[in-house]
Amino acid sequence: MYNHRLLLTIPVLLLLFSTNYVFGITDSRDVKEIGIDEKTGEFVPGDIRFTSESNETVELKDFFNPAKPLILNLVYFGCPRLCNFATDGLVQVMNEQNSLEIGKDFKVLTVSFDPKDTPELSGTKASRYREMVKHGDPGMENWVFLTSDAENIRRLTEAVGFRYKVDGDEFAHASALIILTPEGKISRYLPGIQYEPGDFRLSLLEASRGRIGSSEMLNKLLLFCYEFDPVGKKYALKALNVVKVGGVVTLLSICGVLTYFWRRERKEPE
């Protein structure tokens, strides 16, 4: 009994001990100043400028692709825990599902919101995370690590509703993957540091309007049967649409059976 209670207590103590450290919160009032204001349906300005890990100046629109959605992963490279957990979670969900692959079906932009971060530091982070990806092509063209100056960071974070607060040498901030359409419109937010493979896949299918993956018809059927629950922050079945699909399948099955017997009857000699 004692060991059982100890096992239950240890995670709680660790959480209580590390909460301020992970989020960088030193005052309860900070909670009101950090968070994510979802701006689904709005466009992110394509002329926001960044510096790549190879020290080249690029703009957000350089990564827009007519066929591929973008995953925006906002972090800062000196973050002691939360940013690492979030990016680890991104790698994990990419590895847990292989129906959609980085490079082939989508791109990832990992952008630092700390203006002190350098291309050298982003390159170090990039090398570490690219090696962890098991499927697809996580090369420099497909998983891009970027830094920027204070003004361009402000433009990006305001455009996507990402609120954070400087706290000494760290930042108090939230965490979410932000899914952009191929044209740069905000399609969906996946909050947290762990992501369900089903939600991950559906968010990308939704952003691409079903045009990625192996079967566009199957993708559109999935999108017809599922919708995003803004309260639970997950995709859920649309009961009415599932019933409609079931009705169509049943009707087609009946038609198929009737056609079979009709043809069979015609072939029988009189």
Image: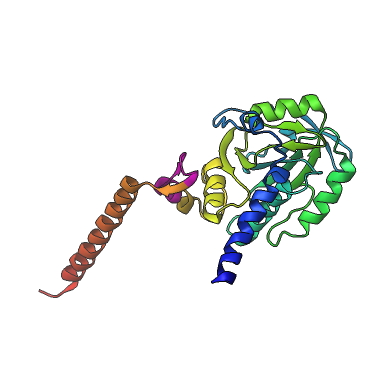
Q: Does residue 144 sit above or below 41 in this rendering?
A: below
Q: How many marks?
A: 0
From the viewer's perspective, is 117 left or right of 241? right
From the viewer's perspective, is 242 left or right of 187? left
Q: Residue furthest left?
A: 270
**Magenta extent:** 221-234
Find residue 21 and report its horizontal and vertical position in percent.
Answer: 73, 45
User: How are the residues colored?
Assistant: rainbow
Indicate whether residue 239 is drawn in magenta.
no
The structure residue drawn at horizontal position 56% and vertical position 32%, both measured from the top left corner, is: 38
The structure residue drawn at horizontal position 74% and vertical position 35%, both measured from the top left corner, is: 62
Find residue 138 and report its horizontal and vertical position in percent.
Answer: 74, 53
* Location of residue 132 (image quadrant): bottom right
The structure residue drawn at horizontal position 81% and vertical position 32%, both measured from the top left corner, is: 148
Look at the image and tell me whether residue 101 can be seen: no
Find residue 171 and report its horizontal and vertical position in percent.
Answer: 75, 36
Q: Does residue 112 sit above or below 157 in this rendering?
A: below
Look at the image and tell me whether residue 13 can be seen: yes
What is the quadrant of the C terminus in the image? bottom left
Q: Residue furthest bottom?
A: 269
Q: Does residue 49 sit above or below 232 in this rendering?
A: above
The structure residue drawn at horizontal position 76% and vertical position 29%, both measured from the top left corner, is: 153
From the viewer's perspective, is 206 left or right of 162? left
Q: Nearer the viewer, residue 95 or 219?
A: 95
* Location of residue 250 (image quadrant): bottom left
Find residue 137 and report its horizontal and vertical position in percent.
Answer: 73, 56
